[in-house]
Amino acid sequence: MKDFGLVVLGAHSGVHNKTLINSYENQNILLVEPVPYNYEVLEIEYNQNKNIFICKNGVIDIAKKDNFYFVKKNV
């Protein structure tokens, strides 16, 4: 298991947290984002950073699988 200096639940596209994320450049960072189109943006933006781990799961307060609903991306 890794130690994380920063964990962001609901990282969205990372735009609003960019300054915060960059301030943890010497620590491991976990970005959690279950919305597929936001996850793709995070992958593109941070795939070169070896200390940033991106998780596409959602987080709830009990151990179970559940449906996840999100707004479709405008195309």
Image (cartoon, helix red, strand yellow):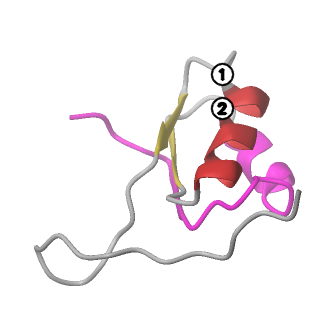
Residue at the spot 69% in from the left edge and 32% down from the top edge = 25
Residue at the spot 15% in from the left edge and 82% down from the top edge = 62
Q: Quadrant of the N terminus?
A: top left
Q: Residues within 10 Å of mark 1 (few under 14, many from 20)?
A: few
Query: Residue 52 appears at what percent x and percent y?
Result: 56, 32
Residue at the far bottom in the pictured view:
61
Q: Is residue 7 left or right of residue 66?
A: right
Residue at the far left in the pictured view:
63
Vertical order, 63 against 6 (above or below) = below
Vertical order, 62 against 10 (above or below) = below
Q: Is residue 41 left or right of residue 8?
A: right
Residues marked 1 and 2 touching at CB (< 8 Å): yes
Q: Amino acid at mark 2?
A: Glu
Q: CA distance from mark 1 to mark 2?
A: 5 Å
Q: Secondary structure at mark 1?
A: loop
Vertical order, 14 against 24 (above or below) = below
Q: Quadrant of the C terminus?
A: bottom right
Residue at the spot 69% in from the left edge and 50% down from the top edge = 37
The stretch drawn in magenta includes residue 15: yes
Q: Residues within 10 Å of mark 2 (few under 14, many from 20)?
A: some
Part of the protein shown in magenta: 1-24
The mark tally for this picture is 2
Q: Which residue is mark 1?
A: 47
* Magenta stretch prevailing secondary structure: loop
Q: Which residue is mark 2?
A: 43
Q: Amino acid at mark 1?
A: Asn
Query: Residue 7 appears at what percent x and percent y?
Result: 49, 56
Which quadrant holds residue 63? bottom left
The stretch drawn in magenta includes residue 13: yes
Which quadrant holds residue 50? top right
